[in-house]
Amino acid sequence: MGLLRVLCARGDVKVEWDTDRADAVAEAERIFQEHAARGYAAFKVDSSVDTATRIDQFDPAAREVIQVPRIVGG
Amino acid sequence: MLTAVSSRLRYIVRGWRGHPSGYELWTECGDGVPREIVPVDDEANRRADQMLRDELGPQYTLPTRQGYLNLPSTLFRNTNYRLRMRRPIEVYKNGRRQPWRLCIVSIERVPSADELLMKYLWLRANEEYVLTTGNLVR
């Protein structure tokens, strides 16, 4: 199972997918791409957030992916 | 990228660059473009809090108990970033707080717990990007 969490004003939106189900993977990827097109950055989290890595492409094999809105200097 | 980082580090060594802006002012981010304000309700805060708990594990209590979370730099020795809720990132070098802070904001409003997690992720995954993107504020 993979998990995509997208941070937004509502807290986070969770999308889970079964890696054996192509339709579920495709739907998770569609949501990922939709947010990526809006400038969201994505991080792949394997064991913990301390080892999070930045990704540009959806990884269906990832345990967890977190997408966050773009950041700017405040 | 190295040029951008070294340029930013020159600013850091010299001190404050002198472009403060309202950190809490969500209608105007660094590029001055007005944004849509989406209200953050209690349910959103509860979800964000739960996510922060899930992701930080035992470290989760630190931001509320001691008011901050320290993250060691992966680029510089004896340097720590101190994350607080809804505050710019404080930088400590050899245990001494620098006279400026790094201000980064999300272009979309997110609950404060999510914002802390966002800074944590960026600092862990791409510290250079935070240093080159953030504005230095007092």
Image (cartoon, coloured by chain):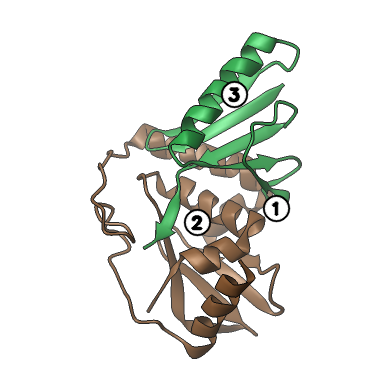
Chain colours: A green, B brown
> Disc 2 on helix, strand or loop?
helix
Expressed as whole percent of the image width and height from the top left, the position of residue B55 reads 63, 43
Amino acid tagged 1: Asp
Amino acid tagged 3: Glu
Subunit ID for the residue under disc 3:
A
Q: Nearer the viewer, mark 2 or mark 3?
A: 3
Q: Residues within 10 Å of mark 1 (few under 14, many from 20)?
A: some
The residue to which callout 2 is attached is: B64
Query: Residue visible at 47% across and 45% down?
Result: B114
Vertical order, B96 against A63 (above or below): below
Q: Quadrant of residue B111?
A: top left
The residue to which callout 3 is attached is: A29
Query: Residue visible at 69% across and 71% down?
Result: B75
Subunit ID for the residue under disc 1:
A
Q: Quadrant of residue A1?
A: top right
State whether residue B66 appears in this view: no
The residue to which callout 1 is attached is: A50
Q: Residues within 10 Å of mark 3 (few under 14, many from 20)?
A: some
Apparent side of residue B137 relative to residue B70 in the rendered image (left or right): left
Q: Nearer the viewer, residue B53 or B86?
A: B86
Expressed as whole percent of the image width and height from the top left, the position of residue B53 reads 58, 43
Q: Nearer the viewer, residue B117 or B127?
A: B127
Q: Nearer the viewer, residue A68 or B10?
A: B10
Amino acid tagged 2: Thr
Q: CA distance from mark 3 to mark 1?
A: 24 Å
Q: Are marks 3 and 1 on the same chain?
A: yes
Apparent side of residue B87 relative to residue B7 in the rendered image (left or right): left
Q: Earlier in the sequence, mark 3 or mark 1?
A: 3
Q: Nearer the viewer, mark 3 or mark 1?
A: 3
Apparent side of residue B97 relative to residue B109 in the rendered image (left or right): right
Apparent side of residue B118 relative to residue B70 in the rendered image (left or right): left
State whether residue B74 appears in this view: yes
